[in-house]
Image (spheres, helix red, strand yellow):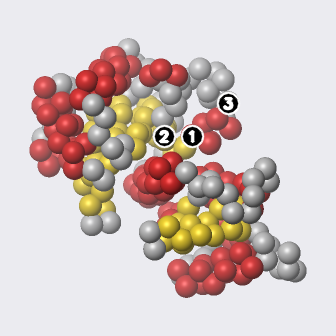
């Protein structure tokens, strides 16, 4: 490892990557913008990241033309070039997009991903155990109103029967007051089509669907007056 002094801005990079595991260079930059910390220009961040890679603090690889980064401590029990599960990577990167979006949208709320939920011992306290013992991808907590919203990232359409079963169970959790709503995020129009039909038949519950299109999130519920 080369002699490179780690700065406070570098620690913001390490912290974000510790939280999400893998992230694109653009996602690291957007995280810094959302939190008003770190490098103020994309070029300065990119140059610094390459220095950190050269010094051995970070690893990188290219995925679909994006530079993906992860901390070297993630490879402690693996080879320097780990076998990446690209199906899980795709999901993880989309969760990052949603995380950054929510951090910008809900500046006064707490946004937690699965890693932070587990680190906060909420799982052990049985506060976030959902359907079939599943933990949500993200949780939005509004501490002022004591409301909690679960967030799921759905890239592929499940069978209609399975999807409907999951949503009906979420409805039950909302009715019983365990959670205050569920927000689904997707870039798949087939998922949106299913939700449009489901929500027309199941109105009155805080279940929302957002579609990623042209680098922005579209609130489908508002457009089609659903839910």
Specify whether 176 is left or right of 224. right
Question: Can see residue 86?
Answer: yes
Q: Can you say which quadrant of the picture contains the C terminus? A: top left
| 3 vs 2, front mark | 2
Q: Is mark 1 on a helix, strand or loop?
A: helix
- Give the residue at x 38% y 19%: 173
Residue 2 % position (x, y): 85, 80
Residue on which disc 2 sits: 137
On the picture, is 99 further left or further right than 4?
Answer: left
Label 1 close to label 2 by CB (< 8 Å)? yes
Which element is circle 3 on?
loop
Measured as percent of width and height from the top left, residue 1 is found at 86, 75
Which is nearer the N-term, disc 1 or disc 3? 1
Does residue 185 appear in this view? no
Q: Please give left or right for residue 18 compared with residue 183 in the image.
A: right
Check whether the beta carbons of the residues at disc 3 and disc 2 lie within 8 A of each other.
no
Reply above or below: 136 against 66. above
Which numbered marker is on residue 114? 1
Query: Which residue lies at the image location 27% right of the left edge and 31% below the top edge?
Result: 159
Q: Which of marks 1 and 3 is in front?
A: 1
Residue found 78% across the figure and 72% down from its top: 56
């Amino acid at each position: 490892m080369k002699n490179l002094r780690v700065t406070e801005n570098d620690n913001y990079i390490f912290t974000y990557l510790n939280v999400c595991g893998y992230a694109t260079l653009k996602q690291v930059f957007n995280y810094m913008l959302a939190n008003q910390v770190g490098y103020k220009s994309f070029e300065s961040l990119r140059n610094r990241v390459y220095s950190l890679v050269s010094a051995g603090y970070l690893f990188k690889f290219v995925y679909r033309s994006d530079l993906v980064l992860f901390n070297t401590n993630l490879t402690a029990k693996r080879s320097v070039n780990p076998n990446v599960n690209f199906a899980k990577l795709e999901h993880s990167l989309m969760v990052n997009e949603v995380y950054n979006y929510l951090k910008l949208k809900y500046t006064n709320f707490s946004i937690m991903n699965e890693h932070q939920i587990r680190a906060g011992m909420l799982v052990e306290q049985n506060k976030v155990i959902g359907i079939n013992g599943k933990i949500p991808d993200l949780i939005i907590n509004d501490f002022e109103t004591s409301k909690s919203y679960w967030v799921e990232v759905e890239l592929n359409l499940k069978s209609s029967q399975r999807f409907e079963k999951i949503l009906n169970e979420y409805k039950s959790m909302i009715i019983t007051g365990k959670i205050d709503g569920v927000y689904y995020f997707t870039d798949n129009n087939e998922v949106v089509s299913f939700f449009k039909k489901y929500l027309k038949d199941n109105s009155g519950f805080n279940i929302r669907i957002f579609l990623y299109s042209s680098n922005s999130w579209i609130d489908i519920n508002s457009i089609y007056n659903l839910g």
